[in-house]
Amino acid sequence: MKQAQRMQQDAQRVQAELAARTVEASSGGGAVKAVAKCDGSLVSIKIDPGAVNPSDVAMLEDLVLSAANQALAQAREISAQEMAKVTQGLSLPGMM
């Protein structure tokens, strides 16, 4: 029981740390940068004004989507790694 309580406290601590931790990804050679928190939320999107071409909005949309997806993927990976540390060695029935 104490182990479960300690693990719950550790999980809450890690979740709070992840909510404050950010990652950044870019696309288009840095033309678009996305920042995400490791809790899975986007913090910001920065677009270099030189990347804005009114005749090719689709390219800019692709760059934004790519940068955002990369940042969110990094955030998910970090979150999974950190939470795995908390649950390491735990064997829950039905969870394998």
Image (spheres, helix red, strand yellow):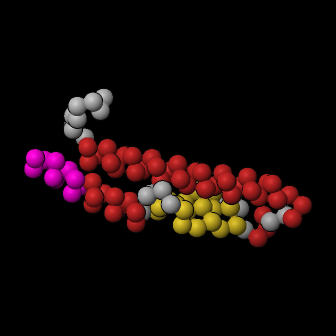
- What residue lies at 60% left-to-right and 61% top-to-bottom? 34
- What residue lies at 87% left-to-right and 65% top-to-bottom? 54
- Answer with the quarter of the image where residue 24 lies: bottom right
70 falls in the magenta region: no
Residue 67 placement (x, y as % from top left): 63, 55
Type of secondary structure dominating the magenta stretch: helix
Residue 14 placement (x, y as % from top left): 30, 57
Furthest toward the left, the residue is: 2
- What residue lies at 44% left-to-right and 57% top-to-bottom? 38
| Relative to 8, 49 lies left or right | right
Stretch in magenta: 1-10
Q: Using the image, determine if residue 35 lies above or below residue 87.
A: below
Residue 79 placement (x, y as % from top left): 40, 51
- What residue lies at 71% left-to-right and 55% top-to-bottom? 63
| Relative to 61, 35 lies left or right | left
Residue 90 placement (x, y as % from top left): 21, 38
Q: Using the image, determine if residue 51 lies above or below residue 82.
A: below
| Relative to 82, 3 lies left or right | left
| Relative to 81, 92 lies left or right | left
Which image quarter holds the C terminus? top left
Furthest toward the right, the residue is: 55
